[in-house]
Image (spheres, helix red, strand yellow):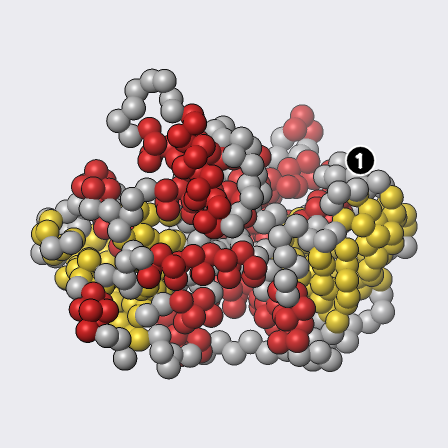
Amino acid sequence: MSDPVEQDALDRRVLDLANVSKSFGGVRALKGVDFTVRAGEIHCLAGENGSGKSTLIKLVSGVHAPDPGGRILMNGTAYERLTPPQARREGIQVIFQDLALFPNLSVAENIAFDHVLDGYASPVPLRRMRRTARAILDRLGFGIDLDAEVGRLSIAQRQIVAICRGLAADARLLFMDEPTASLTGREVDALLGLVERLRRDGLSIVFVSHRLDEVLGIADRVTVLRDGACVGVYPTQGMSGRRLAELMTGLTIEPGIVARAVPDDPVLRVAGLTRRGEYEDIAFMLRKGEVFGIVGPLGAGRTELALTLFGMNRPHAGTIEIAGRLVRFSDNRAAIAAGIAYLPEDRLTQGLNLPQPVGDNIVLSILDRLKRAFGFIPPKARRGIPAAWVERLKIKVPSLDHPVQTLSGGNQQRVVLAKWLATAPRVLILDSPTVGVDIGNKKGIYELIREIARDGVAVILITDEASEAFSTCDRVARMDGGRMIEQVVPGEISEEEFAGRVYAR
């Protein structure tokens, strides 16, 4: 039991929302939600995409004004609505899922931008900016170059920079929206350790994550939203991942080992593949209709290997065979022509043209195939092909003319899948396809992967999560330090034993 001082701190409310609603046109994004955060508490906000989590965060941070009739109480002060400056003065800081970084500025400038430059005109205090950024990075234990341009960093490194920027401010209430989505097991552990230290220092933290093990391992309480309404507030002690998933979705999700014995019909064979400084002596074989998982920490060489298979980076040594024929890709067009498709880790900047319609995104990879005389593309093909894929992949969108950026993360991922499946690939490489995707949509993506494999497409699934690989793949390889260490069959080795090897440090 906590001592009286600790208990008094826990009972003190930093944030208190009562009967808060928000409508956009005729759509009610929040419906009379109550939400409280106590001093020194880690509180999880759980729910699927579209449940109202982001809308609630934007109300608290001053981005949106609530509908009349609700109440916002922050540090004992009542507000009809919070403006962004008021929210910052109250110590509210948000690390949004889309990161909102300046890609053309350095790591140090991004981290310390608000904290150091507030109130300064010129000259820019570069030395102070670097000190601030380095102190935060050292607290997190990440050795990112302060002078590196953020736009050139990996998605995982950009996530780390965004986290550091939030911590650089004098926050009393910190919202972390999917902060671990792109981090490896070791980096997640380091971040969660930091979150615990910040809580002990009195900081209140609202943690949003689709990874239920993180929710239950870090939070004191969890508020569950579904369709804009509050399902309830629950202590995490005694809560199971299965029960939390049921509260969030209304579904029972029970991942199990699905490894199958597929016919010995090789589609892809790699031998001695090496790209100096990235990966070395990679060898594996992929069969028709097989799902082959590659798991490993950041820096293992997984994505670099995928980029070579897709013709983006040439290897320095080794061979690639497609259906028994030796191939050498000069670029990704050659890889696509050979039947390779690649869904990148960062779907927002690399996989989609966000302002463009769903239909145009789906046919983007096959425009050359659709062209007729004088570059004319028949309207029937331009509309019919996307419509067929929208129906098959169950993409939830009002029309093919709807911009992709308006869709949920899960539906955006399905649009990227449709774009590449339209090329009729022999091999489909999926790099972290469920990052930032909620539980219900994850289940749908897993089912899609298995359906694609049943149709004869060979699938390479790159993932940080051993559980995801074991519940989806027929074989799983472990990479570390640029080498493929081992290949296993789920069921012949336990998930726990394999995960222990992946995350051991």
**Residue 301 percent location from the top left of the image:** 70, 50
Q: Residue at x 66, y 61 (%)?
A: 295
Please identify the residue farthest to the right as the structure is shown.
Answer: 325
Label 1 CA crowd tier, 10 Å (few <14, some 14–19, many 20+): few
Q: Which residue is drawn at 88% across and 47% down?
A: 318
**Residue 101 percent location from the top left of the image:** 43, 37
Query: Picture quarter containing residue 219?
Result: bottom left
Q: How many labels does the image show?
A: 1
| Quarter of the rendering occupied by the C terminus | bottom right
**Residue 190 percent location from the top left of the image:** 50, 58
| Quarter of the rendering occupied by the N terminus | bottom left
Foreground pick, 459 / 371: 459
Disc 1 is placed on an element classified as: loop
Height in image: 433 above or below 274? below
Foreground pick, 405 / 347: 347
Q: Which residue is drawn at 38% across and 24% down?
A: 125
Going by the image, does 312 lie left or right of 201? right
- According to the picture, the residue beneath numbered tag 1 turns out to be 330
Amino acid residing under circle 1: Ser
Query: Picture quarter containing residue 82?
Result: top left
Foreground pick, 503 / 85: 503
Going by the image, does 126 lie left or right of 305? left
**Residue 421 percent location from the top left of the image:** 65, 53
Q: Which residue is drawn at 83% across and 61% down?
A: 285
Foreground pick, 437 / 137: 137
Height in image: 253 above or below 172? below
Going by the image, does 100 lie left or right of 89? right
Going by the image, does 218 lie left or right of 225? right
Height in image: 211 above or below 322? below
Query: Picture quarter containing residue 462?
Result: bottom right
